[in-house]
Structure formats: C-alpha cells, structure tokens
Amino acid sequence: MKLAAVGLATAVVGVVLGIPGLIGIGSFWVAMGLVVRSQAETFKSLKAKNVDGRTFARSTALLLAVGLPALVVGILGLGFPAEHADWRWLPVIVGGLAVGFGVLGGALFLAGSAVEAKTGADKAIVPATITIKAMRETGTYINERPRLEFDLLVMPDKSSGVTSYEVTKKATVPATALGSLRVGDGFKALVAGPESPTAMEIHWDQPVSGAADVSTRLEQLDRLHREAKISDEEYEIQRQRILGSL
C-alpha cells in the first residue's frame, strides 16, 4: 500500500495547489497500488528468492506500468501550470525509480539465468538415468509449459564411477514429455554428480520405463549396499520399492 499512500498524498497536493498533473498521476498511483497489493504473493516470492520467469516478468511489467506513465507526464509537463512547473519533477523521480528497478531487476534476472543455465550445462557431462520418486505441481508455467518439482533418484552409468544419489529439483516440462511423467519411470540425462546434484540436462525425448530398468536399479542398489553407503534397512526398503514398480 506504500504506492497508494504516495499516490493519495500526491493527489491531495494537486488538489490543494490546483495542479491537474499531480491529481491525475496521484490517482493513477492509487489505482496501481491496489493492483500491486493484489499481486502481493509475486513480490513475496521475489523477496524469498523463489523466482521463476513468469513471476519476474509479472513484477517487471508492474514496475514499468507504474513508472512509464509518470515519466511521460513529468517530462512533458502534462497538466502542470507554468507557476507550478517544478512539481513535475515528482512524477519524474518516482517514475524513474520504478522504471530503473524494473529494467535493472529484469536484466540481472536474465543474466543470472543465462549464467546458471550455462554453468549447469557445462557441469552436466555424466550419462545417467533419473527415476521419478515423487512429483508436485508448483502452479507456475513458463511459455505455457508446466514447472514441476520432482524427487529424483539419479543413477549414473556404471562406467562413470559416480555413485547414485537423490535430489529434489524443479524443471519445466515440454508438452511432449507429459505423457511419460509417472512415478517409477524416468528419463535419460546428463548430470554433474552428487557435488552439484541439481545440475543436469534432462533428455525429455528419451523416457525410460521403470519396469525395463529394474535390473539396472537393482545393480546400483547392490553396489551402494556393498560399499556400505546405505544401511541394511534402507537397502531392503529401496529393494522392495524397485521390485514393487514391476
């Protein structure tokens, strides 16, 4: 509600001094403040750094919607009588801050996403099979593709010498792979290993049936047990889960 409060104060000053420009832009900020309030969850996600592309695009659009009209009104002096021309700097300053935050935030997000994607791709060099243990909707979409959260069992190829591990990862799933999303099944992938567990390149066009991969999963589980990396109890639990997927 801070934007609405600033807008109300601006409109009141405009009424007192008889400045149509301040009345108009103040009223606009009040309306936009109510819109921003309705999008409170978006800004909470930003503060918590729980951000995806759709969330960031929405927040950037709101900041630009607040700032650009204010800049136009202030720079052109629309509705500002000559004797009150100095007041046009108020919408210029507020609008400039809003646009600046929107542009800078968007640029940093895009740059960070590009670096993260490149880093993950550079690290993901070990062939593996990932098996879905559980999956959950996040309620967000990127380019109309659902973004899901997966609990995955990652089983690198035996020749790599990398041990199996589990990881929770969010991923945007292409429409062509939606029919292959089943607990117990999975996909071929390139992974970085347990040191960077979320760095992976999932080959959505290479689904793997859980039943067809049971022997490989049992071999991986036996190896982990022989190397004393899992307890007897965990070994039996995981073995029953694998056999139960038949």
Image: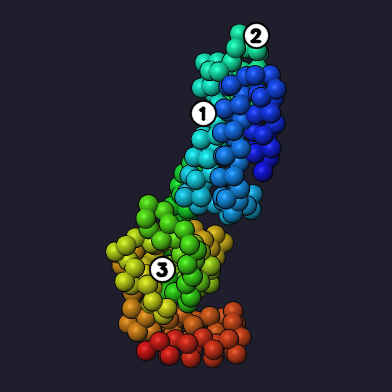
Which residue lies at the image location 37% right of the left edge and 72% below the top edge? 181
Percent from the top left, x then y, of residue 36? 58, 45
Mark 1 Cα shell of 10 Å, populated few (<14), some (14-19), many (≥20):
some
Which residue lies at the image location 58% right of the left edge and 21% below the top edge? 21
Q: Quadrant of residue 126?
A: bottom left
Q: Is residue 184 above or below residue 154?
A: below
Q: Quadrant of residue 99?
A: top right
Left or right: residue 122 compared with residue 84: left
Which residue lies at the image location 60% right of the left edge and 90% below the top edge? 233
Which of the two labelled residues, at mark 2 and mark 3, occupies the earlier sequence position? Answer: 2
Q: The disc labelled 2 sits on which kind of residue?
A: Glu
Q: Is residue 2 above or below residue 24?
A: below
Label placed on residue 165: none
Determine contact: label 2, label 1, CB under 8 Å: no
Q: Quadrant of residue 174?
A: bottom left
Q: Nearer the viewer, residue 153 or 14?
A: 14
Which of the two labelled residues, at mark 1 and mark 3, occupies the earlier sequence position? Answer: 1
The CA span between labels 2 and 1 is: 25 Å
Mark nearest the camera among 1 and 3 is: 1
Label placed on residue 83: 2
Find disc 1 in the rendering and name its residue.
68
Find disc 3 in the rendering and name its residue.
128
Determine contact: label 2, label 3, CB under 8 Å: no
Left or right: residue 163 compared with residue 127: right
Q: Secondary structure at mark 3?
A: strand
Q: How many marks?
A: 3
Which residue lies at the image location 67% right of the left edge and 43% below the top edge? 1
Mark nearest the camera among 2 and 3 is: 2
